[in-house]
């Protein structure tokens, strides 16, 4: 971990933009299918450098998914790039029928995940996307916690055969890792090991969970902390290991229904032991407000993670 870089910030959509340019230079089969928002999704540099590997379909998400499926049948590795709310739900039928059902090698790379669109309002805040897409067979669902982890996970997605949903933030996120840290899709990243309580977070909430864990440790609480960057396939072994504490808190910038919290609860219920408390979007739409305020309205805060842990430990 790059503790000294924790105050440095970059949006994870910037990580996608930088990494897709690197990948495009290495492999001429890497394509970007833009939905006419390349500036926001950080694909304009790719389009300028590799015009023959870039297609802009206009504001037509479903067409973009179908075109990407077609490209995949010819051996190309297309990344469809749009906002998360449209890349998950407007494209959902095409993702199911044309990408996941034939198990084609298409990547759905989406910026503006979770509440990070903030002032854009509820219409642009994707709070259901990972839950919707994790229910579709053959789909892999991933969200990196910071710039460096996201770059590594995008690179892994390009190497991994099959449909992958990659979710990025619009807002800047603190650096947690350094550029030498390695990541594996489907394998949780352990940030802290402890035996009193476990916290499992993903995406933009990992930093909040890390700060909460530090506060708890200062009070003598032993905390296990996982960055569960892959929602599907979930690292079941890592969740089961957390059950040794008997207490798990999940933290996510996503509806608490069918996201990380639900995925963890499924494992815990099947194991038949332990308790889980879910912190995330409280099954309500967002509104136009600053990102931090929206998190606060849903209890996705350092303070609430600490208070929840203390309640569970009593």
Image: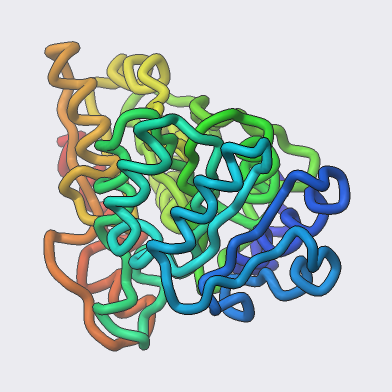
Give 226 or 256, whichever is nearer the viewer.
Answer: 256
Give residue 139's position: percent from left, percent from top: 40, 35
- Residue most toward the top? 271
- The answer to whether any part of residue 211 appears in the image is no
Q: Quadrant of the C terminus?
A: top left
Say which residue appears at 59% left-offset and 53% top-offset. Answer: 79
Q: How many marks?
A: 0
Q: Look at the image and tell me in which quarter the N terminus lies.
A: top right
Q: Quadrant of residue 16?
A: bottom right
Judge whether 193 appears above or below 6 on screen.
Answer: above
Pick whichever, 294 or 306, lies toward us: 294
Identity of the residue drawn at 42% across and 49% down: 209
Q: Is residue 33 visible?
A: yes
Q: Residue at x 25, y 33 (%)?
A: 263
Residue pictured at 28% horizontal, 60% vertical: 89
Q: Is residue 249 above or below residue 160?
A: below
Q: Nearer the viewer, residue 243 or 100?
A: 100
Q: Position of residue 220 (x, y in %)?
A: 40, 36
Point out residue 51 in the picture as x, y percentages from the top left corner.
79, 68
Compared across the picture, whether 287 is left or right of 205 comes to left
In the image, residue 16 sits, relative to residue 257, either above or below, namely below
Q: How is the image coloured?
A: rainbow
How far from the left and from the top, in percent, is residue 211? 47, 54
213 left or right of 247 in image: right
């Amino acid at each position: 971990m790059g503790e000294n870089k924790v105050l440095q910030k970059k949006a994870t959509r910037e990580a996608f933009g930088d990494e897709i340019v690197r990948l495009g230079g290495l492999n001429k089969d890497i394509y970007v299918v833009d939905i006419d928002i390349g500036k926001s999704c950080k694909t304009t540099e790719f389009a300028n450098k590799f015009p023959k590997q870039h297609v802009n379909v206009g504001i037509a998400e479903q067409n973009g998914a179908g075109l990407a499926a077609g490209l995949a049948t010819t051996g190309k590795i297309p990344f469809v790039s749009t906002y998360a709310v449209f890349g998950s739900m407007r494209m959902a039928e095409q993702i199911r029928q044309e990408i996941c059902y034939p198990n084609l090698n298409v990547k759905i790379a989406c910026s503006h995940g979770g509440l990070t669109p903030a002032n854009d309002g509820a219409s642009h805040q994707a709070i259901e996307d990972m839950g919707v897409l994790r229910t579709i067979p053959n789909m892999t669902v991933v969200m990196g916690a910071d710039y460096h982890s996201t770059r590594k996970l995008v690179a892994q997605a390009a190497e991994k055969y099959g449909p992958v949903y990659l979710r990025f933030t619009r807002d800047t996120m603190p650096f947690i890792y350094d550029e030498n840290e390695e990541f594996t899709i489907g394998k949780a990243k352990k940030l802290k090991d402890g035996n009193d309580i476990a916290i499992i977070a993903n995406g933009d909430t990992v930093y909040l969970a890390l700060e909460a864990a530090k506060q708890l440790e200062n009070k003598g609480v032993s905390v296990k902390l996982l960055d569960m960057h892959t929602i599907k396939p979930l690292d079941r072994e890592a969740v089961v290991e957390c059950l040794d504490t008997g207490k798990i808190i999940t933290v996510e910038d996503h509806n608490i229904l069918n996201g990380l919290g639900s995925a963890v609860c499924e494992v815990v219920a099947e194991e038949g032991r332990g308790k889980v408390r879910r912190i995330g979007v409280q099954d309500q739409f967002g509104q136009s407000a600053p990102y931090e305020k929206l998190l606060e309205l849903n209890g996705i805060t350092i303070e609430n993670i600490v208070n929840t842990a203390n309640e569970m430990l009593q």
